[in-house]
Amino acid sequence: MTQPRPMLSRRNRLHIAQFLVLTLVLFLGLPERPASAGANLIANPGLESLAGDGFPVCWEQSGWGANGHTFAVSTDAHSGARSMSVTLTTAGQGDRKAMMLEDTSCAPNVTPGHQYDLSVWYKTSTPNTVMTVFRHDVQQGWVYWTDLASLAVAADWTKQTVRTPQIPANTDQIVWGVTIYGNGTLKTDDYTMVDATQTVPDASCSAGDKCVKGDWQVMPFQSSVRAIHAVVLRNGNVLLIAGSGNDPAAFAAKTFTTAIYKPGTGQFTAVPTPEDLFCSGHVQLKDGRVLVMGGNKDYPAADGSHGYKGLKNSYIFDPANNTYTRVNDMTAGSWYPSATALGNGDVISLGGLGEDSHGMVATQYFDESENRWLGLNEANQTWNFWGLYPSMILMQDGRLFYTGSHVFGNGTPGTGSSIYDYGANTITPVNGLRKKDERDQSMSVLLPPAQDQKVLTMGGGNIETNPDAHRLTDLIDLKQATPAYTAGPSIPQGTLTGGVAQTGDQGKMYVSAVLLPDGKVFETGGALHNRADPVYEASMYDPATNTFTPGMATDPVPRGYHSSAFLLPDGRVMAVGDNPGNGTFDMRVSVYSPPYLFKGARPQITSLSSANWAYGSSNTITVDGPVLKAELIRPAAVTHSSDPNQRFVDLPMTVNGNSIDLNLTSNPNLAPPGWYMLFVVGTNGVPSVAKWVKIG
Amino acid sequence: MSRTRLAAVVLTAVAVAAGVSWVGLDSRDPGTIRTTSVAARGVLPTVSPSAGGPAAATKGAGTATTPEKAAKTTKPVKHATPAPFVQTFAGQPGITRQKPKRKPTAPVRVAPTVDGCDRNYGTIAHCVPVRFPAGVTDKCVWLREHGFKNLKVAAKDSQKLDSNRNGVACDE
């Protein structure tokens, strides 16, 4: 009789042991998951460890200004035994911050391109608080980065979470905290910072060249008017103003035209036009109506006895009924005036030619609340001549930055660029703009995001001296104590008529630059000489890297004098106009689809909690998928390469799945009141179609 | 128990154990995972807050406030609107501020040819350049190449384009 076989023989046990050892070795050999995933990157996040002076380790008492303040470690904690308390008693100048220490051993490490969710538990008795972030630039050291979100007043412990924008290049660490700038007490505790970088989906694109160059289409119809002035309206239609359209026969016949273009249908609707609004200025008011100022009172005489004369008339165009309504006259005639919307909704207009063809030196101020132009003595006057269509960009503190971009001839005397303080009634020069007398019909844009306060000025020429237009760009950071232009990358070169390649330093005037919802700037159109020699070239400027990507698809239609390009709410770019010296006018309409429109599904904003947003508020939207960023883009009001109101305002996100709270700045100078296009950009880099929201 | 069944049981047990361990690693207390060098050392350094130091100066220098509208509020107000948070960038220290000029008594003269066009030729719609681009040796050729036709001399033949003096520029 054979012995029963044991359940586990020695050999079986050996095999099992071998298997377990092998499994253990393999298990231990598995790569460790990244520590960052879900990890809190903050040192001493609960503020429990104190330094020798009794303040939490890795935190500091920061801020500036003559204000009564107290920093303290409080026993009123969200968890543990301690929180930080900051009290302001005599606010009015400066602020105070409970901030992480700018120290390599304390500041959280970050990776460029990543995003982080920053959270803090807080109580505050004042709404005047904001989450502030500094970044460590590997070349510049510690610099201010951005403000993310205001904290609502809260008597109980409340959690605020905000996602950073993508970490800029050359950044290896950040610190952040909460700034208090109003009287009250702010307590904070239990800070967290986690890597919230989302997976980038496969960016497969099967559209060939369009994937990298985009694509132009010339519409099968023509504009019904000479589209010299273009304003995108709050309903998505485009106001195209010709007036007499630089056509003396139309002027003589008093045939003045305007049309509404509907991008959705390609239809044009004629609008009765009360005066010759050719050469006017224009800007959207906060209710979405369009303030049109000045225009053409007369063309120049052949015998040289007078030049162009400016109209004093001013009108408001209402997109609700497509009509112009006259308001009171400006204080002076204005032919080629600037128009900049201010943070309070008012409008400042500078420069141009008066009724007598001479330089218009008044500061003309439209009071939005009174719906009228102030009298000459009601507005501050510097009696400075700013030239024609001077590009005046609203800065975050309410001053105006004259970029040096202008129309016709030389720049202003001196450095050709300056900062105008309407309140103090002073002008201070700004250095560094190259070829300031060849910035005629260059284009300046406040780069995305507006919070970065950087301006790029591109190209330009001079219709008097008529040199080859150049390809210089100059960049200025208005966050610096003494901002000065520095050399930017050159505009890529294209071809001239007949496909002749540009050479040497040849660039372009009549430049169009359009802020896109993905945060880049599309540069297109232009010409080499005064109303002659179109340049066929388009490029994509990336503010994050300060580089141009050359070789974007070019508009087959020449786009020189009296041309414009602007963003449509669907994310495409529309281009109109060209008025060469031979007196013709190109009525064709071109539409550009940027590469992002060929790279996959577009995210959708499926709902808005409200279309009316207050400054410093958080506004909930829902989307149908993961989102990289969200922003507001002010609709265009452009002519002669000049749209100083064009801006892209970042909206820091508080993400909760497909429900996202968008945090709007408390500063109206960063986003003057009015209607904006709200875009979200998916993780695939593709923007949504815009929804319209009203700010302020 | 067959060998196969035994092996399956053991394999399952190992897989479960490994899975539990793996899951356990995932669910570590986030508070104990630190990626700063301080956290990595596990000991917090003693640091003196440097309110007046360079770092604080950096943070302070770029910040400002605007008149604080809520300052008179003694009780916390839910959903109050924050005052604008304005930075003191671009102070331009040391740069002279140009004060307003006196109201001009004489006009700021701007040439009638402000647009660079010679109004002696064609209609107002035309723009014969006051100055032709560098390298243009024959203005009439340039004008023809750029689509100018039937260019009448409207006033003076300032650029000598009407050599046969018939009142039409560049027609010979």
Image (cartoon, rainbow, N blue to C red):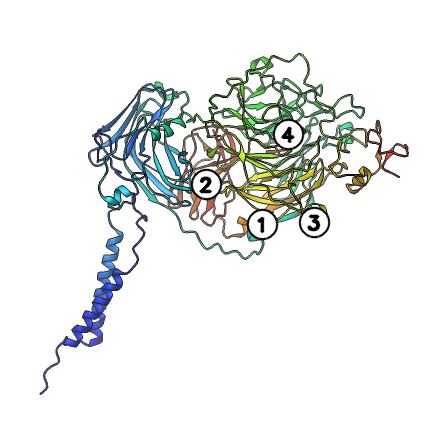
Q: Give the mark nearer the N terminus: 1 vs 3.
A: 1
Helix, strand or loop at disc 4? helix
- Residue at 43% across, 32% down: A665
- Residue at 49% across, 51% down: A601
Q: Give coordinates of residue A231: x percent, y percent.
A: 60, 34
Q: Is residue A564 visible?
A: yes
Q: A337 left or right of A634?
A: right
Q: Give the mark nearer the N terminus: 2 vs 3.
A: 3
Which chain does the residue under circle 2 lie in?
A: A
Q: Are marks 1 and 2 on the same chain?
A: yes
Q: Which residue is mark 2?
A: A630
Between label 4 and label 2, give the one nearer the viewer. Answer: 4
Q: Give coordinates of residue B7: x percent, y percent.
A: 21, 72
Amino acid on which the number 3 mark rests in the picture = Gly
Distance from Cα at disc 1 to Cα at disc 2:
22 Å
Q: Give coordinates of residue B64: x percent, y percent.
A: 40, 25
Disc number at residue A214? Answer: 1
Which chain does the residue under circle 1 lie in?
A: A
Mark 2 touching mark 3, by CB under 8 A? Answer: no
Mark 4 touching mark 1, by CB under 8 A? Answer: no
Helix, strand or loop at disc 3? helix
Q: A541 left or right of A388?
A: left
Q: Which residue is mark 4?
A: A437
Characterize the local packing of mark 2: few (<14), some (14-19) or many (20 or more) Cα atoms within 10 angstroms.
many
- Residue at 24% across, 45% down: B32
Which chain does the residue under circle 4 lie in?
A: A
Disc number at residue A499? Answer: 3
Between label 4 and label 1, give the one nearer the viewer. Answer: 4
